[in-house]
Image (cartoon, rainbow, N blue to C red):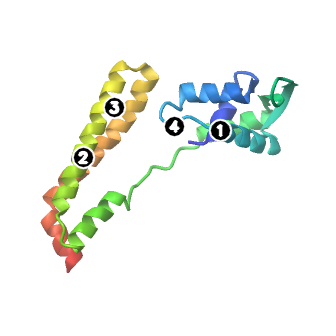
Amino acid sequence: MSIGHTLLGLLESGPRHGYDLKRAFDEKFGHDRPLHYGQVYSTMSRLLKHGLVEVDGIEAGDGPERKRYAITEAGITDVAQWLATPEKPEPYLQSALYTKVVLALLTHRDAADILDIQRAEHLRSMRILTDRKRRGDLADQLICDHALFHLEADLRWLELTAARLDRLREAVTA
C-alpha cells in the first residue's frame, strides 16, 4: 500500500492535521498495522516538497505548531493516476516456505513435518480471520476475505506439495 497516496486520498475530503490523518488512516486501513506519527509527518513533508499538498494553516498549541494540510491539484491528479494503475500481482515464485521444504529434503529432515506444522498455522490463522470477519463491518469482512482467499491458496499448495514430496526429493537431491 502506498501510504503517501492513501494520505492524499484522505485529504481529498478536506484539509486535516497530521494527527487527524493518522487517526483516519488507522480507522480505515490500519487495523493490523497502524501508522506511527513519525511516518505520517515524514510522508507529509515529502508530499509538501513534491507539491502534492500545501500547508493550509498553522495553529499554535502547547507543544509544536500544528500544520493543517490540504491536497493540491497536482495531488488530486497523482491520486487519480495511482488509483487507475493496476497493482502487479504477487507471484510468490520464491517463498520462504518452499525454501524450507527444499532445505529439509536436502538435509534429510522430514519435509512432511514442516508442511504439517505450516498447515496447522494456516488453519489457526483462518479461524482467527473467520471470527474477525463474523464480528466486523463490511470493510473488515472484505479485508478478511482477501486474506482468507490467499490462505486457502496456500493450503492447496501445501496439499499438492505433500502429495509430491517423494518426486520433489528425487528432483532436488539428484
Q: Distance between the residues labelled 2 and 4?
A: 25 Å
Can residue 157 be seen here? The reply is yes
**Do residues under tags 2 and 3 come within 8 Å of each other at their CB atoms?**
no
Tell me the SS state at disc 1.
helix
Of tags 1 and 4, which is closer to the observer? 4
| Numbered label attached to residue 155 | 2
What residue is disc 1 on? 5
Q: Name the quarter where the C terminus is drawn.
A: bottom left
What residue is disc 4 on? 33
Q: How far apart are marks 4 and 3 (CA)?
A: 15 Å
Comes first in the chain, label 4 or label 3: 4
Comes first in the chain, label 1 or label 4: 1
- Amino acid, disc 2: Leu
In the picture, measured across the screen, residue 147 lies left or right of residue 64, that is: left
Can residue 81 be seen here? The reply is no
- Amino acid, disc 1: His
| Numbered label attached to residue 129 | 3
Q: Nearer the viewer, residue 56 or 65?
A: 65
In the picture, measured across the screen, residue 125 lies left or right of residue 42, that is: left
**Do residues under tags 4 and 3 come within 8 Å of each other at their CB atoms?**
no
Rendered view: 81 above or below 164? above
